[in-house]
Image (cartoon, helix red, strand yellow):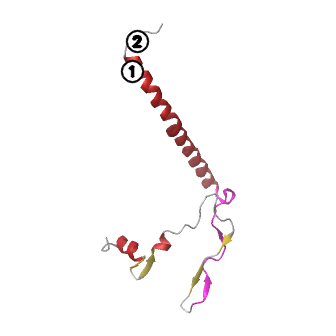
Amino acid sequence: MNQSLWGRLITDGQVDVDGTTVSLEDLVKVEATSGKNCDVEPFEELAKNEKGEELIYRKHPRRARVEFSDRTCGNKFYRVLYLLCKRFYQIVWFYFAPFIGLFATFFIPYALGGYDVE
């Protein structure tokens, strides 16, 4: 596993690609989320130059949480569509599918068994 690029990245934590050092921490860092439990205060990313001085990496502070009002119109539409599809999936898979399973275990043998209901 250590021979591949991803293997070295996972085991060493960083890898050199075409003269640029790529770290695993930078690849898996979450910069923005829609989670309800994240910090809503703005933050600034700091970077150090060759002299060791801290520099502001972003000119404008960015919030870790993306508020609904900060989204573009298209992003709002797709966010609502995603939430509706997720809710539909949850309802069908976790509520309707078990009900159909229970109903089928009763109805299919009853219907195919030739029972007469009066």
Q: Earlier in the sequence, mark 1 or mark 2?
A: 1
Instruction: Report the span colored magenta.
Output: 52-72
Q: Which residue is mark 2?
A: 115
Q: Which residue is mark 1?
A: 109
Q: Residue at x 38, y 74 (%)?
A: 11
Residue 62 vs 35, above or below: the answer is: below
**Where in the figure is residue 26, as x and y percent of width and height?**
50, 73
**Where in the figure is residue 36, as x and y percent of width and height?**
64, 57
Neighbour tally class for label 2: few under 14, some 14-19, many 20 plus, Cα within 10 Å: few
**Residue 70 is inside the magenta segment:** yes
Residue 57 vs 101, above or below: the answer is: below
Neighbour tally class for label 1: few under 14, some 14-19, many 20 plus, Cα within 10 Å: few
Q: Amino acid at mark 1?
A: Pro
> In the rendered image, which quarter is residue 3 located in?
bottom left
Secondary structure beneath dot 1 equals helix
Pick the quarter of the image with the N terminus. Answer: bottom left
Q: Residue at x 47, y 30 (%)?
A: 100
Secondary structure beneath dot 2 equals loop
**Where in the figure is residue 96, as x and y percent of width and height?**
51, 34
Residue 100 vs 81, above or below: the answer is: above
